[in-house]
Image: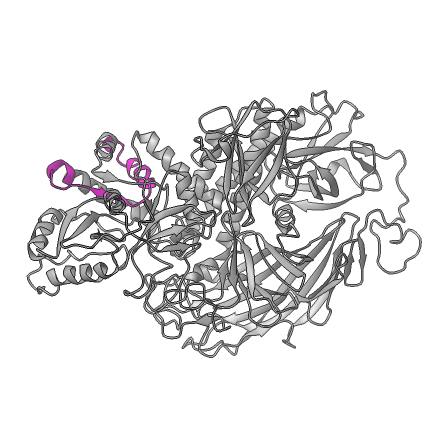
Amino acid sequence: MLDGTEKEAVRAPYRVFVYHHTHWDREWWATYQDFRIRLVELIDELLNALDEDPDFRCFLLDGQTIVLDDYLAIRPENRDKLTGYIRDNRIQCGPWYILPDEFLVSGEAHIRNLWLGIKTAEKYGVVNQDVGYIPDTFGHISQMPQLLNGFGIDNALVWRGLGGPEETFKQEFAWEAPNGSRVLAYWFPDGYYVVDFLHFDNPNKTYDETYGRVRRSLERWAKRATTDCLLMPYGGDHRLIDRRLGRLIRQVNEDLKGFAELRWSTTKEFVAALRERNPQLETIAGELRGAGADLPHLLPGVLSARMYLKRLNFRGQLWLERYAEPMSAIAWRKGRKYDASLLWHAWELLVQNHPHDSICGCSIDQVHREMMPRFDQSAQIAEIVTEKAAQHLNSLLDTSALHEGEEAIVVHNPLPWSRTDVATVRLEPKKGVHPRTHRLLDDEGNEVPFQVAPVEGRMAMTDKWFHTEVRFVASGVPGLGYAAYRLAEREKPLDPKLVPYAAVQTTAKLKGSEPQTDLHVGRNVLENRYLRVEASLTDGTLTVVDKTTGETYGGLNAFESSGDAGDTYNYAFPLNDNVLRTDTDRNAVVTVQAAVAGHASATLAVTIDWALPVGLTADRLSRSAERTVVRLVSRVTLAAESRRVDIATEWDNAIRDHRLRALFPLGRDARASRAEGHFDVVERPAGAPGDWGAERGAEGDGESFFGNGWPEPSIGQMPQQGYVTVSAEDRGLTVANKGLPEFELLRDGRGTIAVTLLRAVGWLSREDTLVRVGGAGPETPTPEAQCPGVQRAEYAIVPHAGDGLEARVFERVHDYLTPLYGTVTGKHDGTLPMRGGMLALEGDHTLLMSACKKAERSDALIVRLWNVAKAETAATVRLGEAPSSVRYVDLKEEPVEPYGGTASIAGDGSFVVRAGPAEIVTLEIRF
């Protein structure tokens, strides 16, 4: 029970549960192979100890199962012995595949991580420990209790991100997710790295350094305990086993008589003992990202270290979650084999990049070089699987109405709602496709304007490098469905004088005066029926007018450059910083060009040549007086019928030790932001939070830093997934991003969202930063963390009325994040019409889909949804084929009882899905 009504009296001696463990960073200050050799030596010695000493009770191989794969790849002959000891509970591992960073990977990636833990255990015929062991992640997401509950785990062992004074903060508490899910949580008061027995056999060590050290630790923990049970880790990062432990426990017990009794145990036994005592616990809700005088380092700068890794991870997750799995599921329902093994292999490669020291970017350069092939290989698999699924679906279309030599362009929509958005497809240049010579027709015979451009690059399943990209606006593409368009030659080419765009200003006949869509292009201006975008020739900022509300947003996409004297773990301003902005720096030279002009979309290229300090001074106290010019090129795109502005900014990063941010002022004072997180939209106050230990959730003093004199001050930079939104006085602004996980809402009176594009530093860890006591790792140079070379950041501006939830901005954002997928097919008979859908969510709901895939253990379809709102919601689900049954399942795809356990199917095959506030709902759909 989490809620005891009466606290049981604490009695002596305390029961101390000692668990022997290693915390295994797969790669960090050494490479994967370096650490694997150490792992092999560790497990070799562990197996010998278990063979030779029946009193060597047990050992925790961290909370991850990948160590089994890493070891048995080198020692396959020891498989039976290793798995035998796991079955005997003398070795514990899991439930994770790898111990992840929680904020830098998607919510669905966490689910797949736990699934990979299950699959690895099943492969070896063992059972994972059902303990939510996450001792060293850099803070904890709000929905972790719901995720753990979804896998049958009712507890969590955590450290970073919370704490407080001994008098007020207890080490056991009830951790509650936004949907009300709870786990019994334990906080390590001295961290998981405890080696109090280390020096016991050293004759040069005193009683105070041995027995006294253990007693002092236990006395500290006892002040925070809610029962007579204490948990004592014995081990740490890459620590080997200690064969003396049984003897040392007996020796210490003699010294501690009357105060405490140590027993060699497991984390599971400790959790069970806590539950037996039914303690009265404080409830702590939501994410754990606190800072304070008594809290461990959160290390928040990892959100923006080596931003290129974050962008690649976004790409990998997107291809698997939004394209490969949903389109494979649709193709499977239409007769194609669902290749789960191939998809899981892609997930495995991707998740191997999710350990906290890997995706956080805080390892040595070689480690991050070795991550790149994993990212690439995972994405390659996902891209090929997507294309094969699309080709299978295309082959079923009835395109017999095409004339010989004609092609059908098929646009696939992997989102569960009908959309109108830009679609692109690549054709062979030799086909000579051009709007003057060809026309594009929808399934009703209406001509659709399109534009073409030569592009280069690799595509899945082709050896072609040069392509012609066809771009057009696809209207009303059904949810999880497709729409096919006929590409045909014109009987007579169009007048060559006809300009393929519409101009804002007055022009002569045929010279931009013939609009085919609502999109117009002018001098530094893009405009459609919803938005007007103007780029300033003075400072390069954008002014966006929302025609639907009449609101004007100015000063958008200014850039800020500040010095960074920190390391991969923490942003740290130099003592005498020089913060520069393109909207105030007279040295910034601006040029605006019309880069693309068309009827489907148009692009302005805003170029800023900006002289910036080349790095820090030798003493790292200031930015250098020497400057070099950095050219920032922002390609600002507006599409026909679009309510958002897409931006892609590129630059060659030739300077060091700095942070680059893009700024987006709301134009009103905003006190809070709402950012998409992991199955949650998290509200946070502007500026830096206050002392978490004293006033949880308190606002800071309005500065970027809060907590002078703390071991690590609180900062205003916060995590996000897909977007951050602010609003005030019925006026709202949302900034979406593709793999840019750090933002800050400034307390500047203008509600400015600052999105970090780059943080360039040259050290893994340094002892001399102003924002952290001590190091966070070895003081090792990491020149590649300066991120030299060409960088690219993609983001979008979405203005709207008032609150982002009411404006359903979450759908607009995911339209941006998940472009329509264009393919080509030829003339053939088929059973499918030229337009159709598999799954659509209908009604006034607040649900997003996070997964659509084949079930793991049956021939059912799994659809996972989550409620973006903190209020109950319901949606009608309409499928392309009538289901025989729909039931609610947990994250392990096992039946659960909420909402009666099943959904009633209407006569037309539709059904209603319900979700509580911030609830994750998984459906098993049978046909």
Q: Quadrant of residue 82?
A: top left
Residue drawn at x 57%, y 34% is 326
Report the front residue among 315 and 832: 832
Residue drawn at x 43%, y 61% is 300
The spot of residue 776 in percent (x, y) is: 34, 62
The spot of residue 852 in percent (x, y) is: 54, 35
Residue with the most extreme front position: 5
Q: Is 119 situated above or below 778?
A: above
Report the front residue among 104 and 553: 553
Report the front residue among 622 and 428: 622
Magenta-highlighted residues: 49-78
The spot of residue 857 in percent (x, y) is: 44, 26
Colour treatment of the image: one colour
The spot of residue 886 in percent (x, y) is: 54, 28
Screen quadrant of the C terminus: top right
Q: Is residue 195 magenta?
A: no
Screen quadrant of the N terminus: top left
- Left or right: 897 with respect to 602? left
Residue with the most extreme right position: 509
